[in-house]
């Protein structure tokens, strides 16, 4: 096992879906995968492996925020040989037309985190998604007639930001939505030569004040996951 994941070598697939909530990981595994096994329960951050249309896929909870996702993604990449990582999360729309229930595919992720500032010492690294994954996801979203946007995410370290007015600048520069994990995921994937993408459903819009109901969040989450599974299994 690694420090935070209790899997034996070979128990985790090369392709891993990454919801923040471990109970969502369990729901994805039990709803969509066949021959499911739970490979870790450390800290209740559940991870499962199964098959989707005959292809091995794992689903690992990451927790919220860049420090938490960095732990799981680092161990998946460094110790379990993960090659394709897709975060399936939620985000807050920063543009008026990034409406609740829409999907946002993050081609890049700005951040207020100091993780990369420390790692790159004065350079401002631009965390970016893998193009082949983005293309595959967009093809599936198009075919399904889903409402989606492709653009920049903002990965914040503070859900309750000390200076929320700073987000207006991001809106001004066309940043589509705020979430809390993509920048760390993209940076780690690049470091280990793996492919990564984050797709998020818009749970609330910070410009219009609209919010989804719990029921709507569940339905849009399911559609986002189905498209992700189809995209990685293609
Ligand atoms: N901020 C950060 N992460 C989020 C938000 C938000 O407003 N909404 C959904 N995920």
Image (spheres, grey):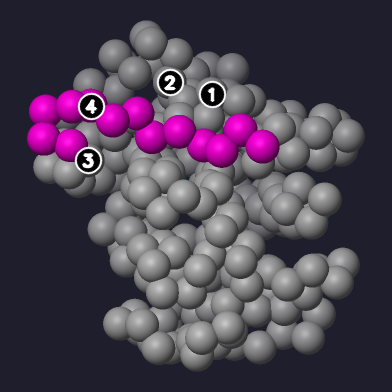
Q: Which mark is residue 151?
A: 1
Q: Is residue 78 left or right of residue 22?
A: left
* Disc with the residue nearer the chain's start (1 vs 2): 1
The residue that label 3 is drawn on is 116
Q: In this rendering, which labeled residue sits more in front, label 4 or label 1?
A: 4
The residue that label 2 is drawn on is 175
* Disc with the residue nearer the chain's start (4 vs 2): 4
In which image quadrant can residue 117 be found? Answer: top left
* Disc with the residue nearer the chain's start (4 vs 3): 3
Under circle 4, the secondary element is: loop
- The answer to the question of whether label 3 and label 2 lie on touching residues, with beta carbons closer than 8 A, is no
Q: Which mark is residue 124?
A: 4
For the image, the number of numbered tags is 4
Answer above or below: position of 101 versus 167: below
Where residue 139 appears, as percent x and y from the top left, is 80, 33
Q: Residue furthest front?
A: 193
- The answer to the question of whether label 1 and label 2 lie on touching residues, with beta carbons closer than 8 A, is yes
- Residue 158 seen: no
Residue found at x 50% / y 79%? 46
Whether the residue under disc 2 has CB within 8 Å of ligand 1:
no
In which image quadrant can residue 52 be found? Answer: bottom right
Answer above or below: position of 228 versus 130: below
Under circle 1, the secondary element is: strand
* Disc with the residue nearer the chain's start (3 vs 2): 3
- The answer to the question of whether label 4 and label 3 lie on touching residues, with beta carbons closer than 8 A, is yes
Answer above or below: position of 64 versus 9: above
In magenta, the rendered stretch is: 120-132
Helix, strand or loop for the magenta stretch, by majority: loop
Where residue 11 appears, as percent x and y from the top left, is 58, 84
Q: In this rendering, which labeled residue sits more in front, label 3 or label 2?
A: 3
Q: In this rendering, which labeled residue sits more in front, label 4 or label 2?
A: 4
């Amino acid at each position: 096992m690694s420090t935070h994941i209790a899997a034996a070598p070979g128990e985790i697939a090369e392709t891993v879906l990454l919801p923040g909530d471990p109970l969502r990981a369990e729901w994805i595994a039990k709803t969509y995968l066949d021959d499911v096994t739970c490979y870790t329960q450390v800290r209740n951050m559940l991870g499962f492996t199964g098959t989707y249309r005959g292809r091995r896929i794992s689903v690992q909870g990451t927790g919220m925020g860049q420090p938490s996702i960095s732990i799981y993604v680092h161990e998946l990449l460094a110790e379990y040989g993960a090659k394709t990582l897709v975060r399936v999360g939620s985000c807050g729309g920063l543009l008026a037309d990034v409406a609740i229930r829409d999907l946002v595919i993050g081609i890049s992720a700005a951040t207020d985190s100091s993780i990369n500032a420390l790692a790159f010492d004065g350079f401002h690294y631009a965390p970016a998604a893998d193009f082949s994954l983005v293309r595959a996801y967009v093809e599936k979203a198009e075919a399904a007639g889903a409402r989606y946007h492709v653009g920049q995410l903002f990965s914040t370290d503070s859900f309750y930001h000390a200076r929320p007015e700073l987000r207006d600048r991001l809106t001004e520069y066309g940043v589509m939505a705020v979430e809390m994990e993509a920048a760390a995921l993209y940076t780690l994937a690049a470091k280990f030569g793996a492919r990564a993408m984050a797709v998020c459903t818009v749970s609330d819009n910070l410009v219009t004040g609209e919010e989804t109901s719990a029921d709507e969040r569940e339905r849009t989450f399911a559609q986002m996951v189905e498209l992700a599974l189809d995209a990685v299994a293609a």
